[in-house]
Every structure is written in structure tokens, then in C-alpha cells.
Image (tube, helix red, strand yellow):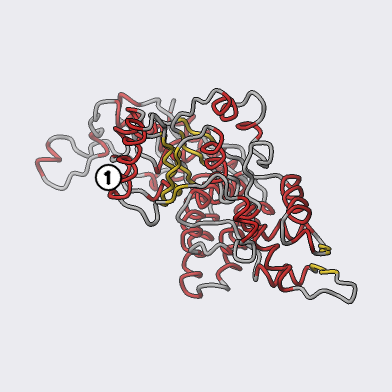
Amino acid sequence: MELFDTNNKKDKQQDSKFTPLAERMRPGTLDDFVGQKHLVGPGKPIRSMIENNDIVSMILWGPPGVGKTTLALIIANLVKTEFVQLSAVSSGVKDVRQAIEQAAYNQKHLNKKTILFIDEIHRFNKGQQDSLLHSVESGTIILIGATTENPSFEVISPLLSRCRVYVLEELSKDDFLYIISSALNNDVELKEKKIEIEDKDILIQFSGGDARRLLNGLDLAVKLAKPDKKGVIKLTNAVIKEAYQANYIKYDKNAEEHYNIISAFIKSIRGSDPDAAVYWLARMLKGGEDPKFVARRLIILASEDIGNADPYAITLATSAFTAINYIGMPEAQLVLSQTATYLASCPKSNSSTIAIGRANSDVENLPAYDVPLHLRNASTKLMKDLDYHKGYKYSHDFEGNFAEQDYLPKELKDKVYYKPSENGAEAKIKQRLLEWWKNRKR
């Protein structure tokens, strides 16, 4: 456990050579806090709670580096509470109980509230989260949990119902420009140097939306660059790239961003935008996604969203899965790109998807009607005596390979599940079926 010393700014400056820039620049007041105006602006919920000295348990949900920990520290500082910080990565039930015992002592003997801040609370298992319930409900602790994961999935319902969830948004370009300017002008180390940045957009891009990564990348770039004869430290794009080593790909194949990007990918193909599809594909593959996962989703989409508008789509998607299984990465990206762009360019139809949905609904909600006798297989004499197969018309014996007879149970005689669209190859299917339906309904 760590107790937060709210007066440590001076210590940060004294130890600046050993303290990361992101820590040196951590704001201590709401006025210095960058972004999240929907939460900390005038009249907004968290500012109002602080001004009224009435903090409730909460979950701060947002991407890395947008200020979750900083906001928790500011709250603890301004409402003058005891502050206990745990990391879900390294803490267990024993640590939680110890923090609760300390909070109970503070409440009983010091008449003081305690904020328990748990970073990455989504990493706590059910038992660890359960251990917080009673103390949060009784008010022994004010819980502030920080998470990059959707709390609806990662925080148990009883604990979630006892907390308010506040969503922290990604920082804007203007926010990042302000952070850079503030660091260059106010940091105890950097303000003494003459620093020129060739392209701040590159610095922001490589940060991947993470202010902590931005500042620490800036700090390392300054250390890598050599001053010129005039003492100017020029942060060229090459120096910035060296500091970061590679462009940061914001993607965690086991976290919510995984689901966000695959969702954008599928919706781009469904929406017939091959450019967006190939962009999201690149994001996934650069982030380390399994190409087989992508290929499986393409097979599903080929049936769900294209169907009979282009019957070849599912053949291509299935072949793509086979091909990437043979060749692997990086060449598999070529196969996936070809398939994704083709599927995005196909005519679309979900008629077959809707058809199975309608059929499933009837199967689930209606009686299991008998198979008509003429459709039953008469494999024994008894079956023949019971009129199994009697009256069945063999389609190939009739003109156009079509026989006028019913195939659904009599109770569903006029039911239509599959209604082809006018798109692509399905338009011809629709015309053909209309002719057959007319004959069948005579």
C-alpha cells in the first residue's frame, strides 16, 4: 500500500533526474487537469462532489493515459481524506482487508474518510471484488476504481451497483498540444533547455492517445538528441521515432479495443466501404491479432450480410481461411485484404439470415407439426400401408424440374420465410421463385 503525500511536488522537483516527466507533470488541481470537462468542468459531477465535499464510490473507465489515476489523486487531495492506493496487478485479498481495517480505524478514531484507489480493478477476480462489497456499502471506504475495460463485463454486478461509473474520454489534439507546451515551459528540467520539435503531430501520433506515453517519449527524445552549436535541441522525426522505437498500435486482442475494432471492420464491410475495411484490418494485424480469427469472421459475414446476392462470397471467404492456414503471416495479410475488399464490394443481402430467424421463431413457438405423408420415406411395407410417400411428385419428372406440391406442414402451408432481395444474383433467384410460388399456390 502507498499513502499519497499531497505535498510532494517539491520533492518531485528535487528528484527530477530520477522521476519520469509524466510524474513530474502530474497536475495537483482540477484547474491544471487536462481534458474530461464533462466530469470536472463547472457544474459537472466530479467537480460538484469535490466542492460539496461529498465523494461517492466510483469507477473511472477510460483508455490508458487519460488521467484516471491523476483524477483520483486530485480528489483525495482536495477533500482532505486518507488515500490508500492498491494495484490490482500486485495486490490480493489480504491487502484489501488491511486497507479496510485502516479505513475502519480512521473512521472510528480519527473521524476521517478513506479513499481506497484500486488501479486496474478489472484484474481483481470475483473473490477479491466480493471482499469490497460490505465496506463500500457501509461507507467504511470510498472506492475509486480505475479500469481500461468495460466495467459491465469486468466488475461484478453487486459492486457495480454500489458505484457510479464515469467514462473518461480520449484526449483531443488540442489537449496534447497543451500538454507538450506545458512540459516545455514549466517542467523543472525541460524549461531550462532550448527545445524545438519538428512535427508535434508525429509525437502525438506515436503516443497512441496516452498522455503518459507522450510525456515520457518526449523526455527520452530530449535525452537522445544532441544540442547544436547554439545549444538548441532539435527533436526531428527521426529522433522521435527512435525514442518510441515504433508507432504505438492501440490494440489489445484480449480487451475491449479488440471488440471495438473487429466491430468497425465488420460494419465497414457490411456498409460496402473497402477502404475502411482494409484500414481496420491493418489495425488488427499490426496489433497482433490472429489472422484466423479475422478469416472466421469473414466466413460468417459472407453468409450473414451477402448471402445469395453473391453466392461466391462464402467460397472465397472459406478459401481465404484455408490459404492463411497454409501460409501464415505476413503473407496472410494479402489474402485477408483481397477477401475483405471483395466482400465489401459485393452486393449485400441478409435475406437468408432473416429466413433462418423466422424459421427458428416458429420452431421455438409453434407446435412440432407432422411431416406431410407424401414427404415421408417409406422404407418398410408398414410405412407404405400407412400411406408414407403416397402422392409424392419427383421434381425431375416434370417440366422445368418443378412439381406443384406442398413441402411445409399443412398448418404452415402459406408461410414464406425466405424473401430474396433485388440485389446481385439474388434478383434472379427472386424472379425464379416467384414463378414457382405462383404455380405452387394454384
Left or right: residue 276 versus residue 351 is right
Who's the residue at 49% across and 48% down the image?
Answer: 256
Residue wearing tag 1: 127
The location of residue 168, given as percent across then percent down, is 58, 39
Q: Nearer the viewer, residue 76 or 136?
A: 76
On the image, which quarter does residue 409 sit in? top left
The location of residue 85, given as percent across then percent down, is 44, 47
Residue 180 higher or lower than 433, as above or below: below
Q: Nearer the viewer, residue 309 or 182?
A: 182
Amino acid marked by disc 1: Gly
Look at the numbered disc 1 and give the secondary structure of its residue: helix
Question: Is residue 1 among what the camera can see?
Answer: yes
On the image, which quarter does residue 221 sit in? bottom right
Q: Residues within 10 Å of mark 1 (few under 14, many from 20)?
A: few
Q: Nearer the viewer, residue 381 or 166?
A: 166
Q: Nearer the viewer, residue 5 or 428?
A: 5
Left or right: residue 73 versus residue 31 is left
Left or right: residue 368 versus residue 306 is left
